[in-house]
Structures are given as structure tokens and as C-alpha cells.
């Protein structure tokens, strides 16, 4: 029906997820500990080929703890891709550090390695290198780690990969979630797979063990409650991990469906420009995001679609344009400002039917696209 709402990225759940939740519920393991949680972490490692993994309450929590694990805090600076969701930068602030924002590449929309290299060289000369760089696997496409990892290594700056949007994506032979000193994932309700709310940190066994300790209130392994560090209540529950296991088992068909949706939009909407992909990468196509002709305003187009019960969103508003970060430093800015000014996120969920997609395209054509 025309009145049925089409969502941007609705959860794709079914009997397998229901059975998993009931299995965990019936076991009475509903706390942030239990066999489903252990199995989910092991299965994430197997899927991504990561050394170790800890499931957490959110991707934001994972960024926060990744920085704390690296000893980053007040007085330190962290370079953050400006064109991202706010949680990337919020994790830096939660750690007490200061974000320094940087522009994107024009073709890939990810952090610009050339711009980063120049900035780090200037800071090295001034004796003021930042402590870390956070790259973002934007909308499900891996950043250019073949360039980013050597740059960060040369300057001795930690690289953290925000793969919140990219589970299932690959760059060459490596999976999203395995780049940098550590990587983070998100399982929020709108992601390609969900645990309702949740995230994970992937990295070395040593890093994951320390993050797991911090995420469990930094409790010492003694019978009574003893603490020598400040900890956090950041662990995922066994119940939600069971949901995650069912979602992970069905991830590949979801990726294939989202790819077919992206291909359909590209074929039907030739006036839109799309993010460039290397032949050696496989994005998960979490969201299909196109750049409108310069004569059109994505906010107005989103309102026109909303009037037809279709959810669409403008592309991420860059962090350096956010009021909360108005006083923060920015390196470049022209590219990500244009992406925000022209970008539109189209309905991309794996539950969309072919008739849903036709309805979206028809609505866009009526909006002069």
C-alpha cells in the first residue's frame, strides 16, 4: 500500500532471531556474561579473522575504551574524520581528549591520506603530534588502509578504525574490523546486523583483555569486590549476544540484497553521483548514498519523500559544522561540506521489496531527479 512506510534501514529479523532470544532466555543467562556472549565473540573473530574480540554496550563505548587502553586522555589530541556520525568524535571527548577534524577524499569520501600526511608532517616539525587518528569506514566502505597504516606507522601515531558501519566489508584480503591498533563495530538497530543496541572492539589479545577488564567495572579477580582502576558498565548482555549470533549467521544474504539495491539505484538514477570503489574492495552497502545535482537541496528532497511516507536522510553533517564542536580545529573542509550539501541517503534495508524500490525511484523522479 502507498501508505506503508518505507524506512531507511529497518532491522531484518525473523524466526532464527526469535529462537535465539528464547534459547538465551530459557537458559536464565540474561546478564552480561554467559555462553551466548562467549560464542558471539568467537564467531565475530572467525568471521572477520580478528585475533580477539569483546562485545560491548555500543560502538561509542568501544571507541572510548580503545582510547583509554592506549593511554589517551586529557591534553591529548586525536585526528577524526569530520564526515562521520557524531559518536566517532564523542568517544574522543569521553576519553578526555580533544578531537582535531580532517577532510575527506573527493572520490572515496573517507579520510584523505594525503591531507593527513601533510598535517602530521607539520605537527612533527612543531613537536606537537596527535596521539591517534580515527578513520571511518563510511557507509560500509573501507577507508584506504594501504595508505593510512604506513602513514600512521611512520609518524608513530596510533590508528583506530571506526568500522561501525562496515561489518562484512573487505579491503583486499582483510575484513573491516581488522585494521589499525584496534577496530570497533556497531550493532545499533539500523545497522546491517543488530543486537538491538551494542558494539564490539576487535584487536590483539592484550588489548581486548584490558578493554574487557575496563568494561566490567575494572573488577579485580578476587572473591570480594575490589577495584584499582576506574571501570565502566559497558558489557553486552548474554541475551543480546544470542540475537547477534543469529544475525551474524544470516549476514551474507543481507549484504547481497543491499548490493542489489545499490545497483538498482545506480541504474535507475543516473543523475546521482556515487562513492568510488576500488576493484579490490567489497563494501557491505549499508546505506546507498548519492550526490544530488548541485541545483537540488537534499533537505527539501527528504521532505518531499517524507510526504510520501518514505524515509531518507541528508548525508552526515560534518563534525566541524556541529555547534558542539564549533571551537575545534579543522584541516581542510571543502570536500566534506560539499558531501553534506549534496548527499542523500536512500532506503537501503535488506527487507525492502522490489515494489518498495520502484516506489522510491518514482518518488525521486517526481522530485525532479
Image: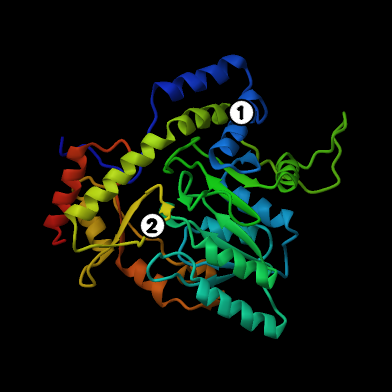
Give left or right: position of 43 versus 269: right
Residue 211: x %, y % from top left: 71, 46
Query: Which mark, by number, is residue 191?
Result: none
Instruction: Name the residue furthest top.
Output: 26
Residue 126: x %, y % from top left: 69, 85
Rendered view: 351 above or below 146: above
Residue occupying image coordinates x 48% and y 42%: 188
Residue underneath mark 1 = 39
Give left or right: position of 61 versus 322: right
Rendered view: 94 above or below 256: below
Residue 221: x %, y % from top left: 85, 34
Q: Are marks 1 and 2 in contact (CB under 8 Å)?
A: no
The first of marks 1 and 2 along the sequence is 1
Which quadrant of the figure contains the N terminus? top left
* Disc 2 packing (10 Å; few <14; some 14–19; many ≥20): few
In this view of the protein, can residue 98 be seen by the observer? no
Rendered view: 173 above or below 273: above
Which quadrant of the figure contains the C terminus? bottom left
Snapshot quadrant of residue 4? top left
Give left or right: position of 56 versus 280: right
* Disc 1 packing (10 Å; few <14; some 14–19; many ≥20): some
What is the C-alpha distance between the residues marked 1 and 2? Answer: 33 Å
Instruction: Say which of 10 and 155 sits in front.
Output: 155
Residue occupying image coordinates x 37% and y 35%: 253
Residue underneath mark 2 = 279
Snapshot quadrant of residue 160? bottom right
SS state under label 1: helix
Q: How many marks?
A: 2
Residue occupying image coordinates x 64% and y 41%: 53
Q: Nearer the viewer, mark 1 or mark 2?
A: 2
Residue 165: x %, y % from top left: 46, 50
SS state under label 2: loop
Amino acid at each position: 500500500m502507498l501508505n506503508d512506510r518505507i524506512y531507511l534501514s529497518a532491522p531484518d529479523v525473523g524466526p532464527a532471531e526469535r529462537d535465539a532470544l528464547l534459547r538465551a532466555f530459557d537458559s536464565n543467562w540474561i546478564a552480561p556474561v554467559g555462553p551466548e556472549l562467549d560464542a558471539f565473540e568467537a564467531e565475530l573473530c572467525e568471521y572477520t579473522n580478528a585475533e580477539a574480540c569483546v562485545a560491548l554496550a555500543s560502538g561509542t563505548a568501544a571507541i572510548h575504551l580503545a582510547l583509554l587502553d592506549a593511554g589517551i586522555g586529557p591534553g591529548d589530541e586525536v585526528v577524526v574524520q569530520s564526515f562521520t556520525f557524531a559518536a566517532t568524535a564523542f568517544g574522543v571527548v569521553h576519553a578526555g581528549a580533544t578531537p582535531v577534524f580532517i577532510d575527506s577524499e573527493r572520490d572515496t569520501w573517507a579520510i584523505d591520506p594525503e591531507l593527513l600526511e601533510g598535517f602530521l608532517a607539520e605537527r612533527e616539525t612543531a613537536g606537537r603530534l596527535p596521539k591517534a587518528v580515527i578513520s571511518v569506514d563510511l557507509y560500509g566502505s573501507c577507508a584506504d588502509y594501504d595508505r593510512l597504516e604506513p602513514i600512521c606507522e611512520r609518524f608513530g601515531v596510533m590508528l583506530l578504525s571506526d568500522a561501525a558501519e562496515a561489518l562484512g566489508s573487505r579491503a583486499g584480503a582483510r575484513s573491516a574490523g581488522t585494521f589499525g591498533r584496534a577496530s570497533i563495530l556497531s550493532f545499533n538497530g539500523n545497522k546491517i546486523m543488530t543486537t538491538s543496541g551494542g558494539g564490539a572492539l576487535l584487536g590483539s589479545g592484550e588489548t581486548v583483555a584490558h578493554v574487557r577488564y575496563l568494561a566490567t567495572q575494572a573488577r579485580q579477580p578476587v572473591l570480594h569486590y575490589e577495584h584499582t582502576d576506574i571501570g565502566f558498565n559497558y558489557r553486552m548482555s548474554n541475551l543480546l549476544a544470542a540475537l547477534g549470533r543469529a544475525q551474524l549467521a544470516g549476514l551474507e544474504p543481507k549484504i547481497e540484497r543491499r548490493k542489489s539495491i545499490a545497483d538498482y539505484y545506480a541504474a535507475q538514477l543516473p543523475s546521482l553521483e556515487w562513492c568510488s570503489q576500488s576493484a579490490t574492495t567489497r563494501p557491505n552497502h549499508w546505506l546507498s548514498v548519492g550526490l544530488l545535482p548541485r541545483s537540488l537541496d537534499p533537505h527539501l528532497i527528504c521532505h518531499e519523500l517524507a510526504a510520501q511516507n518514505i524515509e531518507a536522510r541528508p548525508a552526515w553533517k560534518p563534525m566541524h559544522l556541529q555547534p558542539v564542536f564549533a571551537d575545534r580545529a579543522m584541516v581542510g573542509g571543502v570536500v566534506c561540506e560539499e558531501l553534506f550539501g549534496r548527499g542523500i541517503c536512500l532506503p537501503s534495508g535488506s527487507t525492502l521489496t522490489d515494489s518498495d524500490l520502484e516506489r522510491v525511484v518514482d518518488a525521486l523522479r517526481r522530485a525532479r531527479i
